[in-house]
Image (cartoon, rainbow, N blue to C red):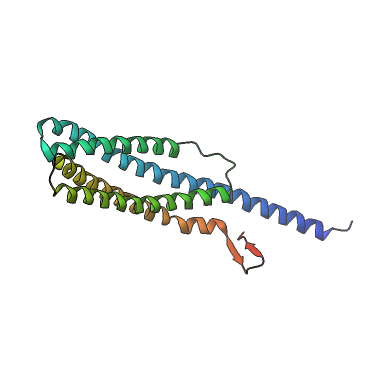
Amino acid sequence: MAIDVKKHLFMLLLLALSTALFAQQADLIDFQTHSLQTRRGAMMVLGSWAAGNILLGASLMPSKTGTDRAFHQMNIMWNAVNLGIATIGYLQASKSIPTNINLYDVTKDHFSMQKILLLNAGLDVGYMLGGLYLTERARRGGKHEDRMRGWGRSIILQGGFLFAFDVVTAIVLSGQNTDLQQLMGSIRFDGRQIGLSLQF
C-alpha cells in the first residue's frame, strides 16, 4: 500500500498550524487579561484621587472663605466628574474576556487606548493653561477675584495630576507593546504585499 506523502505532509501542516493558532489564542487571552488588569489599576488610582479630593474638600470647605473655599469647591466639582469616569472605566475593564477574541481587535484596542491617553495629556495641558489664565485674571481684581484665583489654582492642580496620570498610564501600556508584537509574529510589507511568518 503506497503512502500518500503529500497528504500526510498536508495533515501535519494543518496540525502544526492549528496548534500554533490555539497557542496564539491562549496568548491573546493572557495579553488582554494583563492589559485590562493594568487599566483597572489605573482607574483605581484615578478613583482614589477623586474620592480623596472630594472627602478632603467637603471636610475643609465649610471652615474656609474666599480663595481657599473656592479652591476646595472646584476640587469637589472636578473630582465628581473624575470619580464617574473612573467608575465607568473600571467597570469596562472588568468585563469578561471572550474566548473568540482576535489579534486585530486586541491590537486595535491596545493602541487606541494609548492614543486616547496621549490625547488626554494634551487636553490636560490646556486645563492647566486655563487655570493659569484664571489666576492671572484674578489679579485684576473685581467681584469674583477670590473665586477665579481659587478655581484657577484647583484647575492647575487637577490638570497637573491628570497629565501625570495619563502619561504614566500610556507609558505602562506601551511597555506591553513588545509582547503584542511577538504575538503578531514576523510581518513584512514591501509596499505591494504583506508576508507573515509564524514560529512553531
Q: Which of these two is toward me, 31 or 113? A: 113
Q: Which of these two is toward me, 73 or 86? A: 73
Residue 174 rendering spot, x and y as whole percentages: 42, 56
Residue 59 vs 127, above or below: the answer is above
What is the quadrant of the C terminus in the image? bottom right
Q: In the image as oriented, which residue stretches furthest toward the right?
A: 1
Residue 75 rendering spot, x and y as whole percentages: 23, 39
In this picture, residue 33 sits left or right of residue 49: right
Residue 53 showing in the rendered view: no
In this picture, residue 113 sits left or right of residue 43: right
Q: Which of these two is toward me, 164 or 68? A: 68
Residue 179 rendering spot, x and y as whole percentages: 48, 56
Residue 111 showing in the rendered view: yes
Q: Which of these two is toward me, 195 or 123? A: 123
What is the quadrant of the N terminus in the image? bottom right
| Residue 37 position by quadrant | top left
In percent of the image, x 14 and y 33: which residue is there? 60
